[in-house]
Image: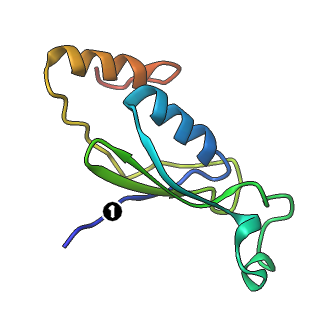
Amino acid sequence: MQIQPYLSFEGRAEEALDFYKKALGAQEAMVMRFKDAPPEAQANMTPGSGDKIMHMSFKVGDTELMGTDDYCSGKAKFEGISLTYNAKDTADAEKVFKALSEGSQVRMP
């Protein structure tokens, strides 16, 4: 059995995917946009969200993660979750920490 994280980026999924590609070398596996959904699903879409990501899948190393723009509110709250990166050595840990913390608020280095 396998459990995969499914993250809601509230309208910023493409930005997140680009960030993970740059910071962690993530590989895009699949992107489905709202405009590509069946017509009955499009009836419930937020207006103007056609180019936003309905579902995406990407890999970081051997781990597959999934994500969405969800309701496109722009107010993603990542509360109560943590994702762990297992670095291969100290140099890798320092490189990834620097990439992930750029433009962020580090609470505990």
Q: Position of residue 87 (x, y in %)?
A: 19, 29
Q: Position of residue 84 (x, y in %)?
A: 26, 41
Question: Residue 108 sits in which quadrant?
Answer: top left
User: Residue 3, relative to residue 21: is it above or below?
Assistant: below
Horizontal side of residue 49 vs 83, given as left or right? right
Q: Position of residue 30 (x, y in %)?
A: 52, 57
| Image point (76%, 85%), residue name | 40
Q: Which residue is mark 1?
A: 4
The quadrant of the image that shows the C terminus is top left
Horizontal side of residue 2 vs 97, given as left or right? left
User: Residue 73, relative to residue 89: is it above or below?
Assistant: below
| Image point (37%, 48%), residue name | 59
Q: Amino acid at mark 1?
A: Gln
Q: Residue furthest left?
A: 89
Which of 33/80 is in front? 33
The quadrant of the image that shows the N terminus is bottom left
| Image point (32%, 46%), residue name | 82
Q: Residue furthest bottom?
A: 40
Q: Position of residue 25 (x, y in %)?
A: 39, 32
